[in-house]
Image (cartoon, rainbow, N blue to C red):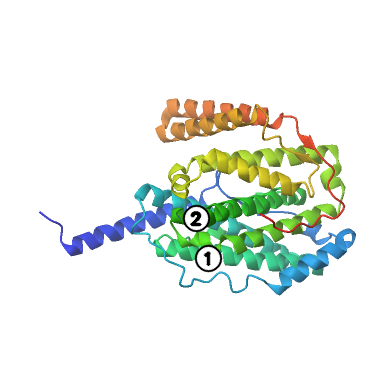
Amino acid sequence: MNATPKALDAEYAELAIQTQQETQALATETTLLNPRFYTTDFDEMDRIDVTPVRAEWDKLLDQMRSDPNKAHFKKNAEWDADWDGMEPKLKREFIDFLVSSCTAEFSGCVLYKEMKRRGNNPDICELFNFMARDEARHAGFINDALREAGVAVNLGFLTKAKKYTYFRPKFIYYATYLSEKIGYARYITIFRHLEANPDQRFHPIFKWFREWCNDEFSHGEAFALLMRTDPKLTQSFANKLWIRFFLTAVYSTMYVRDHARPEFHKALGVDIEWYDQEVFRKTSTIARQVFPVELDIDHKRWMPNLRRMRDAFGVMDAGKKQGGLAGWIKSKRGAVSAALAFVSLYTIPVIRSEPPKNVRLEPVY
């Protein structure tokens, strides 16, 4: 017997609810690979004195004050989204990409807004007010795209349900600087590829990436200037080791996460390993503005250990799904393998350089 239209509508509604619940769970989940929400010592950040970088600081704040992307995040006639025509596996991976991006943008908004709210330092408060504004736009724009697919993230719920990770201010600088700069490198690499291959642009949101990633770039510039206010943040022996740690963690996490979306990258027409290496190369070049060490992504141990880490996370995931004692053992075996791969990546000799006197850069890719 064929199902009645009423029965079909009920089935589709149930599937939509399940998909929405999965999306919210994905956004809320806290794992090694998912974007996190951060908190920090806001009083310490409020004491920052930008005098050593005043000239460059004022130019950056003037640029942010002018709000060049004020009218950018609005749909127009070029917005021709077709969720119904998207292949199911691609649709699932693309939603995963958008949810992860939305969560990352919104986590930045929450952190920056809290910094502005708690502070009294006019330089710091103004900066984080502008950055919170930008990140809110980004998250809202992505969520509008998700809403068209019936799977928008409840951002208000996310602020209450998501676990917060405490980082000392210097760790916030390292992690957020890299997040903003690698975000720029990711978005502009996709944008340039699709600019040359428009037939592979399967969703209109990619058309908005160029101006969008320039926001990411300017946010990274702000953190580069913040790090320059205290030379110890990038020049002491211990902090160089921490910079090396964050570079390794951010790059390897991106590699593992991207390999979990094969259909997404296939639809874009990019080889994942080529894409990731290209993003790493752009990010490493940009980061010379402030970091005195750079990962050697052409070293003979680099790619084999990234692949080893990818496989280890696959084993960990399989163990969790299997459950029971056997699954627990499998998951722990994968965790040990991932840790060993990370150590091998971390101990690759770094490339050393002397950051330039003037820290500010402009997006050129």
> What percent of the width, then of the height, locates residue 67?
68, 72
Q: Quadrant of residue 365?
A: bottom right
Residue in the picture at 77% in, 68% down: 61
**Residue at the extreme right:** 52
Residue 98, label in figure: 2
> Vertical placement of 28 versus 336: above or below?
below
Q: Residue 132 appears at what percent x and percent y?
A: 66, 65
The residue that disc 1 covers is: 141
Task: Please give the name of the residue rendered at 84% of the width and 53% of the height, measured from the top-left corner.
Answer: 228
| Mark before the other along the chain sequence, 1 or 2 | 2
Quadrant position of residue 118:
bottom right
Q: x, y (%) of residue 335? A: 56, 30
Left or right of residue 344, residue 81 in this image: left
Q: Secondary structure at mark 1?
A: helix
- Label 2: state its secondary structure: helix
Q: Amino acid at mark 1?
A: Phe
Q: Residues within 10 Å of mark 2 (few under 14, many from 20)?
A: many
> In the shown orientation, is residue 208 left or right of residue 108?
left
- From the viewer's perspective, is residue 272 above or below residue 51? above
